[in-house]
Amino acid sequence: MSLIEKPADREGAREAILSKVRASLGIEPEVPGQSGARSAIVERRIEAPPRHLTPARVLKPKVDLEALFASTLVSQFASVLPANNFSDVPGAIATYLRQTNLPSVIGLGQDPVLAALPWGIEPGLTLSPGPARPETEVSVSRAIAGAAETGTIFLASGPDNPVTLTFMPATHIVVLTANDIVGPYEDAFQVVRKLYGNGLMPRTLNLVSGPSRTADIGGKIVIGAHGPQRLAVVVVGNNRPPAA
Amino acid sequence: MSPGQSARPGRPRVGLFVTCLVDLIRPSVGFAAVTLIERSGCDVDVPTGQTCCGQPAYNSGDQATAREIALQTIRAFDGFDYVVAPSGSCAGMLRSHYPALFKGDAVLESEARAFAAKVYELISFLVDVRGMTSVGSRFAGRVTYHDSCSGLRELGIKDQPRRLLASMPGVELSEMAEAEICCGFGGTFAIKYPDISNAMVDKKCASIAASGADLVLAGDLGCLMNMAGKLVRDGRPVRCRHVAEVLADELSDPPIAWPDKAVGEGSA
Amino acid sequence: MNPETPAFKANARAALSDPQLQSALSGLPTGLVAQRTSARARLPEFEALRDIGRDVRNHALEYLDLYLETYERNATAAGAVVHWAETGQDAREIIARICQDAGARIVTKGKSMISEEIALNVDLEARGFEVVETDLGEYIIQNRLETPSHIIAPAIHLTQQQVEDDFRKLHTHLPAGRILEEPAQLVAEARSVLREKFMLADVGITGANFLIAETGSSIIVTNEGNGDLTQSLARVHIVLASIDKVLPTLEDVTTVLRLLARSATGQEFTTYATFSTGPRRPEDPDGPDAYHVVLLDNGRAELLGSEFREVLRCIRCGACMNHCPVYNAVGGHAYGWVYPGPIGAVMTPALIGVKAGGHLPNASTFCGRCEAVCPMKIPLPKLMRHWREAEFEQGHTPTRYRYGLKTWAWFAKRPRTYHFCARFAAAVLGALGSGAGRFSRLPFASGWTRDRDFPAPQGRTFQQLWAETRRGVPR
């Protein structure tokens, strides 16, 4: 039997649960019009999701959002590395790794923007393509958006940015253009909808707001639990594509 | 004006809901309440058709009994402009829970709602309804104030007692840590789960002691009996009184759970 | 897990005299509670969001059947296999079969309260699978053969020293002389031990904080990253979720997420919020080959039609227990089943019956702090009172207590007799207690007087004195 074949579940469980739910809600399947009206409400909400409250902290000019994004990330134990242009990214990463005394082998996926970076100007860096392996200590991913609201990075999994790069290595470096920094989460989800289509998602969409952490021992916060111990975000100020 | 004098025109008529604990254990709180309500420009009377608010039944799941007692209380206060209780817990029962008890019975529910709209906790009545800003009494001493749960969270009573205390020359309010945390009384809870109740009042008494006050005030006699009983058992030299006693200068009786011969309490 | 809830009183007493537990619990007010307070202060819209969050959850429940169907359709389109389970037994069978069909040996798990509810680990272990809890707190208690004492901080009842002792006993392959003084050293050790398990796991099981109808996604919200390693590294990812977890849209879930971390740990947002939609895509270099979702009812559909519907709004943040003075006094294990604190006092009778779970809704002063902090504004005291009503109606209220209540009610319903007898009681007790002002022993209130005195009445009732003053007798 293949992994995705559905084993025979107890017969009728689905119908039993749904009819119990309907009974509890007082829905009579026979009442004409009732089910149509309910379905219309549900369909409308899904097709045109209403936005709720947007916190005032993100109702700011773009430049202030960028500052909020960076300062919030730093307060959550992440590092923010500024880069004026894409061509400055390899240098920013190399400097960070050197200063933090970290290995210079970098795992990364097939992201075209990352691939086009002028890595050659940092001969000390070695690229290791593909998903994370147990020995991968440093990884680089590109985020599709950043929400200034809580300094949250949006990463979409796929061949360009394999999900394991976000969780296995001890150090995770994320590249994000300042232009992709938005205010509230809702704006970042709009980016996802534009990239993947309404109602569609990458296999995993990871919202990351710092390095991994735990407080499970004596209630004391320890940075670096199962996921990365360090998160560094390179914010590329200028949006021009990297020189090929 | 002596209590019971017939109503004067233009003055609101207040029915005092005494509460069963004040009636049985500490009537001086009731007289303090009467004094304060009168000072706020109202006439007070005390219907004899009242007993208890019904919480022991209501909180034990005995809805039928709670309804009977609620109806008895509602009818006992027929004709009053306001119903005032020197307890956030009982006032909360009358105000928030009586209507809920009659859900589904349109006639009784609307009667309970009309009744509930007239009900106030004493201090909230003085400040929020009567606009009282000063009580005209004096008291010298360092006090701390415990926020009883129902008054605080059901009725929003927090600043009102503090404002009136601040109007009294000589009162020094020394806030305890975690003043808003339950003392562990909880009515039947203290009897059904005495170990947990004791642990809670133990923490509360430690906060009280740490405040450095020599008098604890609160708006609910149940909480006060619990805290006073624990403080004296542990030999802590802190006295307990209902806040109305201090506000009304009704201090001739010894503090709660305090020996008769106690002297030297601050008073003007 | 066999409910120990009927032994609540004895367990609570033991908890109160356990110095290590008391020391662990003493950190709550300055920890999770204070952190929530400051997170709330940093977001002026917090209270408005609570109202919206409540409305969003209410809406989702009102149309639950349709949102479940929409969720199923969209999840299936993304390659998910959706299973429906009416009972815990059904869910355990489904999960066991998926594990068997995958030829699994090692099963890793992210933190999931619903898996505790259906005692999944015991079942899988009995079938021969090695089950590894990967959340640090869960890992610690799994090895102590304990259950979580808190829904988001499962090992909150343990001190750092206890964890060190456990690790030394458990990780015997590591040098005995190693230094484990700092929490960070303990965390690093667990990280390296568990990393091997992640790499070897065949199946990874997680819960779901929410399901999204719009996209067919499941969401886990974590800080450690263990849930993501669990679901990304195994060949098969199984999501176990109760049917009440579904929310309509990304906007809806966003609103609720704004409240979740702040209410739970006081963080602005958890480190990770992961939205999973189907198995790995054809071009993906990583991720699980199969993605199963088990939708479990286990009584929720029935709760939906009862006076307890509002409890289904719960987002399992734990704020109610953090702020509960009873939980703070006795910790989670005393509650004797999966869900402790106020939410447990409402959920437990629903899941194991009010006869076995009756203590929990009774062991509350109705102080209302839980309701005041609940991000979904669940009226927990009211729902506890409903359980007391059910208990009373079904005749499970203890006889002695019922009898006392009946006697009291007889008097309370007869004002004249009541006032007459109150006068008598006040006079007798007042006379006995005069001088001392209190009783150090009272036969009918021995529970009270064991640890505190009982104030003596002043001697006459208010009604009596009032009647006298009206007649002109000076007080």
Image (tube, coloured by chain):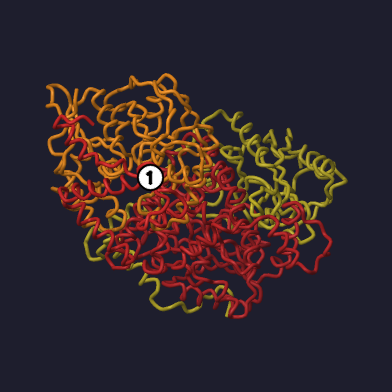
Chain colours: A yellow, B orange, C red
Residue B211 x %, y %: 53, 34
Q: Which residue, as the protein is rendered here, is positioned at the far right?
A: A123
Q: Say whether residue B11 is left or right of residue B62.
A: left
Question: Could you say whether the residue bearing mark 1 is in a helix, strand or loop?
Answer: strand
Query: Where's residue B29, x and y in %?
Result: 31, 35
- Residue A53 percent location from the top left of the image: 44, 38
User: Circle 1 is placed at which residue position?
Assistant: C455
- For badge 1, the amino acid type reads Pro
Is C82 drawn above or below residue A65 in the view shown?
below
Q: Position of residue C225 (x, y in %)?
A: 65, 55
Q: Nearer the viewer, residue A99 or C374?
A: C374
Query: Is C267 drawn above or below residue B243 in the view shown?
Result: below
Residue in front for this viewpoint, A82 or B68: B68
Q: Where the C terminus of chain A falls, by quadrant?
A: top right
**Is the N terminus of chain A in the top left, top right, bottom left or bottom right quadrant?**
bottom right
- Nearest to the observer: residue C347 or residue A35: C347
Q: Is residue A168 visible?
A: yes
Residue C283 seen in this snapshot = no
Would you call the spot at circle 1 few (<14 residues within 10 Å), some (14-19), or many (20 or more)?
many
- Viewer-proximal residue, B257 or C69? B257
As drawn, is A195 to the left or to the right of B124? right
Mark 1 belongs to chain: C
Q: Residue at x 75, y 50 (%)?
A: A171
* Residue at point 29%, 58% (across, down): B61
